[in-house]
Image: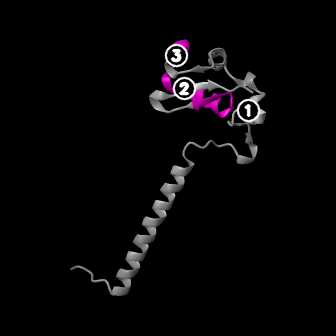
Amino acid sequence: MKKNHTKKQQGMINLITLFSFLLGLVLIIFLKHQEGKGFVHLSDRVESEKSGVKKLPNEISKQSNLNDRQQRILAEIKKQGTLVPSKIYSLVGEVSSRTLRRDMDLLVEKGLVRQDGATKSTSYIYVGN
């Protein structure tokens, strides 16, 4: 036999359902807003006057922390000014595209290069320090 809910109980169930829906919606909006932001504390970021790219001052001076592949990529971007991922991959083709993406994300995070565009129209521009 089916239980009959009183009006008060049904109202409480509806209220809890609505609250859960709104909480989920707020969480989704918050996570979408945070998407793409790094784990660097905002107080550690400094605005670069030259390029408008946010840089991490204590990491920029540590370019020696880059591995050989990252240094080769950075040198080539510095030499040519801008590169697309396919040219970078041909330069260091011994790694997976995911590894190359991580390398480029690191160079962008350190403020050494700037990413323009997305997906197929991506290019990386040297900003230096």
> Which of the two discs, 3 and 1, labels the residue nearer the N terminus?
1
Discs 3, 1 touching: Cβ within 8 Å: no
**Residue 121, x across and y down, in percent:** 47, 28
| Image-quadrant location for residue 69 | top right
Identify the image quadrant of the N terminus.
Answer: bottom left
> Which of the two discs, 3 and 2, labels the residue nearer the N terminus?
3
For discs 3 and 2, the disc positioned in front in the rendered view: 2
Mark 3 — residue?
87
* Dot 3: element: helix
Task: Work out how far the residue at label 1 is from the one at label 2, CA to CA, in angstroms.
Answer: 19 Å
Q: Which mark is residue 123?
A: 2
- Circle 1 crowding by C-alpha within 10 Å: few under 14, some 14–19, many from 20: few
- Tell me: residue 118, above or below residue 20: above
Q: Residue at x 27, y 81 (%)?
A: 3
Q: Amino acid at mark 3?
A: Lys
Relative to the observer, which residue lies in front, 27 or 119? Answer: 119
- Per the rendered image, the range of residues in magenta is 89-115
- Tell me: residue 29, above or below residue 15: above
